[in-house]
Image (cartoon, helix red, strand yellow):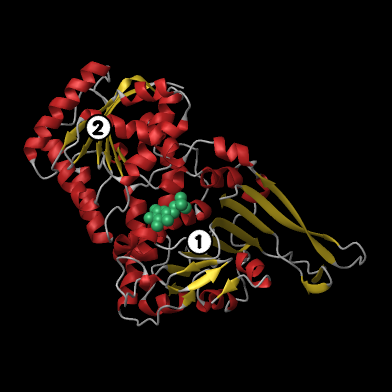
Amino acid sequence: MNEVKATFVIFGASGDLAKRKLYPALFRLYKKGVLGEHFAVIGTARRPWSDEYYQEIARESVKDLTSDFEVVKAFAKHFFYQSHDVQDTEHYVALKKLADAKDSEFGCEGNQMFYLSMSPQFFGVIVGNLKSQNVVNPAGWSRVIVEKPFGYDYATALELNENITSVFEENEIYRIDHYLGKEMIQNINAVRFANGIFEALWNSRHIDNIQITFAESLGVEERGGYYETSGALKDMVQNHLLQVVALLTMDPPATLADEDIRNEKIKALEALKIYTPSEVATNIVRGQYGEGGIDGRRYNSYRAEDNVNPHSDVETFVAGRLSVETARFDGVPIYFRTGKSMTEKGTRINVVFKNSELGLYDSCVVGKYTAPLQPNVLTIYIQPTEGVSITINGKNLEDNLATDIFPLGYRRPEIEIEQAPEAYEKLIQDALYGDSSNFSHWKEVAASWKVVDAIKSAWTDQSVDFPNYQAGTMGPKAAFDLLEQDGNEWVWKPDVWYRERNLIKK
Ligand code: BG6
């Protein structure tokens, strides 16, 4: 691994994300040599911590990742802390002094990675002060990683983008979306473009519909306060889910270079149909969980969660039918669903192909039953299992004219999944190497917000009757009706297993 020399300046250094994700990711990069002795981490936050205390925090966050405590100690010696009020320009003067001193001490050659991991309302003021107080060091490269959410709607995202681009160039801005660091999401390109059999069929002539499920089994837990301001649409759809839609529907890039991939994703996202309010009513479903129980576990209703308004109309579930108006995908429904307190945690994609036009086999035998010929379905398992499978139809053992489903599949072994690099580690490594393939370009963010804003604004005028799905289920009935109207159904039915065993209880 090529070593990268850099000073990190982390805004939000005392936060949960920093402790749970960033410090462990930096530690793994240190262990594998992407970071060597030439790096320093300057953590900033309001709390009055000392360097010693911050180093203790760094050690605590990574101690379970190795049995060698000497490595942990050596790693934490690169950490320094500055108590910082993001509004106070004097603090940036002190920050510059500290950053310059650590740059010389560790030989970071002027390279700087700024990491914005706090409430986005401060991002603009931070980058403004970084510039006005000359914290950005012209001697090396300077990049900024920006955590989500990137704005609260299109207007605030635009304003934020203007603030950031007045200091950093687009190619220095890394808008992070941790789903783009997931191994199987990064695999979508390989599955699509490294396999002639899929590449040739990846269009409206052969694909009947695409189904994307991002199901979470947990409720909002202790994040009720945040979730009340966000809801599932902004929390999951604007970013993670639409990024996956872009990867699945974009045209093939000219090369695998970051710019080529992102250009195609931008085109796909800009081709997403922006719904009118009446189209929102027929194409998008929202839900909120009521109390329920599954497999012996009890769930509160959303309205009874901590820091949630007992009359809240915030959605904890969204499903929809999207339309990508490109020559390749026009007319192919892209169904999605995502929500909290669903049957089980599972992220997967089902690509449903059209049946053969020959019509020679019009029914298949499934066990003892005769059913219509089943479509070929390509499934990409994102998490918790990772893999790819495809169902094909073969001849039934006893009946020459009937077919059975032959499932073919690859599941990555557990041990490989455990040992694979984690999303944040991969993404921070990419940013250190200057590779922005797996980060969102401003135009992607802008296009996503436009789709989401149209849905959100239609909802403000439409009344809801929440709660409308029982915790532990796969969402409200309307999310099933949506597909049924088109003569389709969700391919993935994790709830069926539990219902058959009477494990989903009121
Ligand atoms: C985050 C959302 O971006 O993604 C959370 O804010 C959600 O609400 C999480 O739980 C899901 O991520 P993962 O990696 O657990 O699927």
Q: Is residue 102 left or right of residue 255?
A: left
In this view, 18 is above or below 51: below
Residue at 29% from the left image edge and 52% from the top image edge: 150
| Residue extending farthest left | 90
Rendered location of residue 364, percent (x, y): 81, 69
Q: Report whether residue 175 is seen.
A: no
- 22 to the left or right of 217: left
Q: Mark 1 points at which residue?
A: 217
Q: Residue at point 53% right, 54% down? A: 248
- How much space separates mark 2 and mark 1, taking CA atoms? 36 Å
SS category of the residue bearing label 1: loop
Measuring from the top left, give residue 457's x and y in whole percent: 30, 73
Q: What residue type is labelled 2?
A: Tyr
Percent coordinates x, y for residue 30 in the rendering: 40, 25
Residue type marked 1: Ser
Q: Residue 53 carries which label?
A: 2
**Could you say whether the residue bearing mark 2 is in a helix, strand or loop?**
helix
- Residue 212 at least partly seen: yes
Judge by depth and name the residue closer to the eye, 232 or 269: 232
Where does ligand 1 appear, by image quarter?
A: bottom left
10 Å neighbourhood of mark 1: few (<14), some, or many (≥20)? some
